[in-house]
Amino acid sequence: MPSSDNAPIGVFDSGLGGLSVLRAVQAQLPHENLLYLADSGYAPYGDKSDEYIRERSVWIGAWLQSQGVKAIVVACNTATAVAARTLRERYPTLPIVGVEPGLKPALEVSRNHVIGVLATPSTLSSERFARLMQQVQALSPNTRFLTAPGTGWVECVERGELEGDKVEALVAQALQPLLDPATAPAPDTLVLGCTHYPFLQSLIQAAAPTVQIIDTAPAIARQLERRLRNESSLRVYHLNAPTIRLVTSGTLEPLQRLAQRLLSQAFVESLS
């Protein structure tokens, strides 16, 4: 692991969704240099095999290490579920922080003990998610969890379609089985189990105005800070301003457009 606290933090996702995590990391750790890889040329991961996702994650981990990162944030629920363990085995001295659906935080705020979870098919069918569900239900046996895939949501975010009739219809379609009166009582809390989904949060809230939405990005940023503090590798202050470097395996324009909305002074480039 690089000894310099000036080394960047590496963050990656199957595409643009991890920018929601990068934004939280920047807010929590404003002095850190950040390197983000959007694997948009191979997105989405949610409908791919575990082997495919693991191979891409291992390749990206090796690339980030070649760039001298001091930590890796797997800003993708699907990649975390499938490949985080493999990455930790390959890089045992490198802090690796994954993401997972915020079921435990949802327990703390749900009043009627009915919680909806929105995630990709791969996340919902993963062993990691099954274990998480078992752990949480052991804490609160009376809580009922309803799951649904956000079909087409990742693709909309990747195209930069964050509003409009088409994406509104996809949001309504995914939420319908969760909010159907036949499933009463309906969830009073919704967990966003994919890092792409926070970019559609306003549409989700409009479709379910009384539901509390759980996004785990701030908690991920706090966990990263704890790990770096334990490693004595926080970049607390430096005369040189921090840099944000955004790299994509896909086309530049969607990343550039979203970065302009979320971040300042970010360098955007294609993966070479």
Image (spheres, helix red, strand yellow):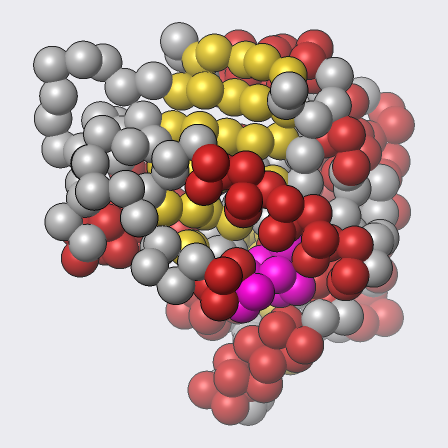
Q: In this view, does 140 lie to the left or right of 114?
A: left
Count the marks: 0
Q: Image point 70% across, 10% down: which residue? A: 253
- Which portion, as a residue range, is magenta? 79-86
* Front position in the image: 22 or 197: 22
* Front position in the image: 173 or 220: 220
Q: Residue furthest front?
A: 66
* Front position in the image: 48 or 182: 48
Give percent across and percent down for residue 177.
84, 61
Give the quadrant of residue 24: top left
Give percent across and percent down for residue 30.
25, 27
Q: Is residue 109 left or right of residue 252?
A: left
Magenta segment includes 85:
yes
Give the quadrant of residue 204: top right
Give the quadrant of residue 65: top left
> Does residue 168 appear anywhere in the picture?
no
Magenta segment includes 73:
no
* Front position in the image: 100 or 210: 100
Q: Is residue 211 above or below residue 108?
A: above
Q: Is residue 115 left or right of residue 221?
A: right
Give percent across and percent down for residue 143.
58, 81
Q: Image point 77% across, 62% down: which residue? A: 50
> Does residue 57 appear anywhere in the picture?
yes
Q: Quadrant of the C terminus?
A: top right
Q: In this view, does 52 lie to the left or right of 256?
A: right
Q: Image point 61% across, 61% down: which residue? A: 83
Give percent across and percent down for residue 81.
62, 64
What type of secondary structure mainly makes up the magenta span?
A: helix
Q: Image point 20% across, 36% down: which residue? A: 4
